[in-house]
Image (cartoon, rainbow, N blue to C red):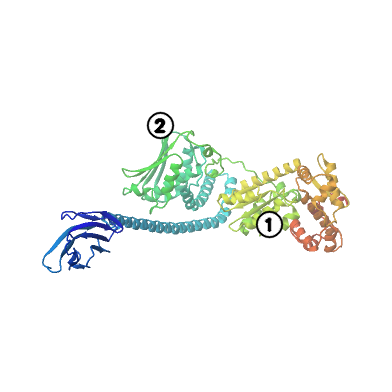
Amino acid sequence: MILTELAAGNDKIGDISLVPSAKIKIPGGLDSFTAGFSVLEYTSPDKIICFYKLEGLDKDWISIPAGKREISRERLPEGRYTLRIRAGSANMPARFSECAVPLRIKAPWYRRWWAYFIGCLTAVCALWLLFLDFSSRRALRRRVKESGVKDLKLRMVSDLSEAIRTPMTLVMSPLQELREQEKDPEKKDLYNMMCRNCQRIIRSLNQMSDLHRLDSGELEFHFRKTDIVYFIKDILRSFSGSAQSRHISLDFSSEQPELHLWIDQGHFDKIIFNLLSSALKHTPDYGHIRVTAGTPSEDGKVTVSIFHSCIMPCDLGKLFSRGDDGPGLYLARSLTTLQHGELSAANVDGGVMFFLTLPCGCDHLTASELSPTERHKELYTRYSDSHEEAAVTKDEDERDHKSRKTIVVAGFDSDIRNYLKSSLRRQYNIRTCADSRNAWGIISTTIPDAVITGLDSAGASSLELCSKIKHNPGTNHIPVIILSTSDDEESAEESTRTGADLYLRLPVSIERLRGSLANAISAREAIRSKYTNEIHCDYDRIKLEGKAGGNFIDEVISIIHSNIGNPDFTVADLSREAGISRVHLNRKLKDALNISPGNLIKSIKMRHAAYLLINNDASIADISGSTGFSSPSYFTSSFRDYFGMTPKEFLGKYRGCTDPDTLDKLLGSDWRQV
């Protein structure tokens, strides 16, 4: 008996002779085979019976049908087997012929050891990635939560800062006036110290905001050449009272009487102030603090050392961290680094020594760092012992009320509004309004020389007032000064976009406010006298007095006057009757009058209507029709936008008015010729 063929699945392995030692391997992934054999018996082949057994899987012999010489098995598990085949005569079953062949069925690739290893490794990697993703999401949620808490704290500090700035303004401004008027050197020094500490109260409130800007990289630095000897002495005066009350000696020494370095004065003040605050906090009673300013070294650096006595050595590793000692030293080191310097500390005999090292010169500074700024300028002011006072005489007190400029103060709380009025009333006529929304009526009728308004956390009304002033042809020449408790750049930029001439942050020196007012008014008067003309209305004719080109302007105004009762009269009609394109008409009016054609038409109609309301008994509906308005409601809306009050309110206030100054404000000077 021989094994003639062997097939695994549908693939033949080949003709194989039965050799007991032969080993047959069935490829992985195949779990079936078919084996063919032949019995070498030719005398009576029909009496041959065959059996087979797959050792390792079958326990009993399996009979093969008569005449069949083939064995088929399916769904075999992987492993090692031995295929045994017996053939014998049916008459003599004890005599048989047998052959055996080893078989090995390989496992498919996905069930081999390396497949299991790769699968396990992949599962571990997947679990690790899931863990990392979960950890990152949890960290992100924690950071978002911490950021929200931090933003909430910053908002609380900002709100507190704004709430304190208002009363601080009422403290600082009178205090600065007392300081300027005081001639006694000792009292002047006391006032100087009080002013400095008022400013530092506000800066202390801003320290949390500084930390936020520091973390986000938004802090700006502007360096100025400064005598740090005088600067540090000036700061030490703020600590002398606290040091004396605790019997702490506070000494300063310098090898040079003056030592000039390029520093950002505001941030350098914070550095020294925080270092001295920490030193005073940890110095025991009857101890001593010593500040020393060294001389420039060979490498072009200057070191300022601050020693304070201390009972126990400090933990230098945690000294400059945001720990229990507060953010002061952390902020000081960060600001020092941004000023291109170094700040370190060391435990020395009897206490702790801070070393503040700064470079000399300005070669290491960028152009933006050298740019000028007005921030912190009050921190470095040498006040003279002999200050020449600008006394107010009786002649100034009795100056004619009508010769003064008029200022409108709108917004603010009553304390600041009354303080501004009392501080400015000797130089100006002051009109006040508690609400910026209601100030337009005063401004449009009195035409003041300047407007001061306040921008607080709900300052939308002040911005609307500023925008209305700047977009009205009758008031767009009025300077607008905005005072704000906000310290962010966004508020200043928004004020500038609405047309404000000046943005000042509270608290502000009253002297600076007076100077800003005087400069704004004089600058605006110079511009108006050079570039603008005044439109005069006599309500029977309209003429223009001004520079060259008046014939054309006279013609334009005459066309408007002749069509003043036409409700369909537009800029297009005006340009067509004037024989010029709308673009050229707009350019010529802008050059000559600094006004657009549409605003010119509106201004003439409104002044004409105002004249009729003052001097005629006609109804508002009749006047609206005679000035070319299609409906009384549209006329009322336009009139309110221009004068800040309805025609009815205007009528009740100015009907029969004969005051020349008031009529000049409302109608222009040529009403007198009517």
Q: Secondary structure at mark 1?
A: strand
Mark 2 residue type: Asp
Give the mark count. Answer: 2
Residue 208 location (% of width, % of height): 47, 53
Residue 342 position by quadrant: top left
Comparing 243 with 662, the one in front is 662
Q: In the drawing, does residue 239 fall left or right of residue 558?
A: left
Task: Please say if 346 is above or below 454.
Answer: above
Percent position of residue 45, x then y: 19, 64
Q: Residue furthest left?
A: 94
- Between circles 2 and 1, the one closer to the viewer is 2
Residue 444 vs residue 363: left or right?
right
Horizontal placement of 620 versus 328: left or right? right
Question: Does residue 297 show up?
Answer: yes
Q: Residue at coordinates 20% horizontally, 65% vertically from top-left?
A: 57
Q: Residues within 10 Å of mark 1 (few under 14, many from 20)?
A: many
Residue 661 makes an appearance in the image = no
Question: Tag 1: residue type?
Answer: Thr
How busy is the neighbourhood of tag 2: few (under 14 within 10 Å), some, or many (20 plus)? few
Residue closest to the eye, 307 or 162: 162
Left or right, 674 with respect to 452, comes to: right
Which numbered disc flags the more N-terminal residue, 2 or 1? 2
Q: Which residue is mark 1?
A: 432
Alpha carbon distance from label 2 to label 1: 60 Å
Which numbered disc covers residue 299?
Answer: 2
